[in-house]
Image (cartoon, rainbow, N blue to C red):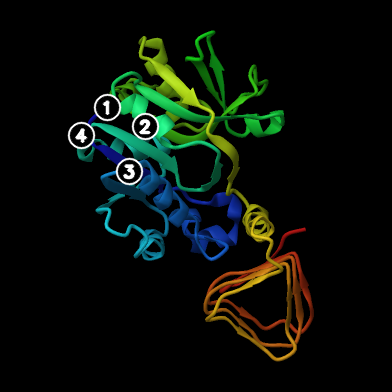
Amino acid sequence: MTGLSGIILAAGRGSRLGELGEHYAKPALPVGDRPLIHRHVQLMRDAGVERLLVVVGHQRTGLQEALSGASKGIPVEFIVQDEPAGIAHALALAEPQVPGACLVSLGDIWFAFEGPVSALSDPVRDGEFAAMLASRQETDAARVRRNFSIETDARGRVMRVEEKPVAPRSHLKGCGVYAFGPEIFDAIRATPVSSLRNERELTDAIQVLIDRGEAVGHAPIVRDDINLTTARDLLELNLDWLRRRQLWDYVAETARLAPGAEIENSVIGAGAAVLGPIRIRNSLVLPVSTVSADRDLDRMLVYPEGVIACP
């Protein structure tokens, strides 16, 4: 087997996050006690990557700070995507630094796995497949429509992928983690710009691989996945983090609470300050934010520059 490179694509601009997206790169936003991108680094570590490439763009300084210390011995190199030209373009920028197989994750997605990531990477590293796609069976067709669908033949090999299908022909959904051989880069170059977003879609490049006769497979190793798209998504991710850990609340050690303040089913980030004796319920206070409200908060997201209601 050849060495495995890890690539986290983290350059996107969170336009549907509104004002919050102007101040943060999505992978730098917290889920519980650490930034989302730390979970991607752990994914790469679990897969045994030998080096890590992170493609950054919007708010890249904050993202680099969020990533500081998370790699724990894995060499990290940052690649800058200067223009918002899409996922396939971001991946193509890494080509000169990728000598063989690579494991790729979309940095704005939260994952829960039920199988080893090696089920993706090993078949590509040993040359059996040109690409492997993380997948899950999805009963909610709306979630398939927001991602991409996978159709397979009788052997389980992928025969068709479709980005954001209007009428999905399969309940098998792609989940934003991939293993690729070097063939993917030629496929990206051969991929026309899509009418969907006026950019080269990674899903279309995968279809180019399939149409060229390359072996593409999938591994149903994802139990759940959530795209971080809106402020409400971020709040729900944090409330789900509490539920999975059976926590009533989470208040970082460096957060400060005024006497009489009550925290219920909420996450209060590092360095945050709650200045009054209010009740905060079902809410998220981002690190170094100040809560100066004189009335209770419920389903609110507080960040240093403002407050967002998430009904």
The answer to whether the residue labelled 3 contacts the one labelled 4, judged by CB atoms less than 8 Å apart, is no
Which residue was labeled with disc 4? 99
How far is mark 2 from mark 1, CA to CA? 13 Å
Q: Secondary structure at mark 4?
A: loop
Q: Quadrant of residue 215?
A: top left
Q: Position of residue 276 (x, y in %)?
A: 71, 88
Give the residue at x 29% y 21%.
Answer: 127
State which quarter of the image contains the N terminus.
top left
Which of the two labelled residues, at mark 3 and mark 2, occupies the earlier sequence position? 3
How far is mark 1 from mark 4, CA to CA? 8 Å
Which of the two labelled residues, at mark 4 and mark 2, occupies the earlier sequence position? 4
Within 10 angstroms of label 1, few (less than 14), some, or many (20 or more) residues? some
Which residue was labeled with disc 1? 182
Q: Secondary structure at mark 1?
A: loop
Give the residue at x 39% y 45%.
Answer: 46
State which quarter of the image contains the C terminus.
bottom right
Q: Quadrant of residue 62?
A: bottom left
* Residue 127 appears in the picture as rendered: yes
Give the residue at x 36% y 61%.
Answer: 64
Q: Position of residue 82 (x, y in %)?
A: 33, 49
With respect to residue 171, does 225 lie above or below?
Answer: below
Nearer mark to the viewer, of 3 and 1: 3
Q: Position of residue 21 (x, y in %)?
A: 54, 58
Which of the two labelled residues, at mark 3 and mark 1, occupies the earlier sequence position? 3
Which residue was labeled with disc 2? 121
Nearer mark to the viewer, of 4 and 2: 2
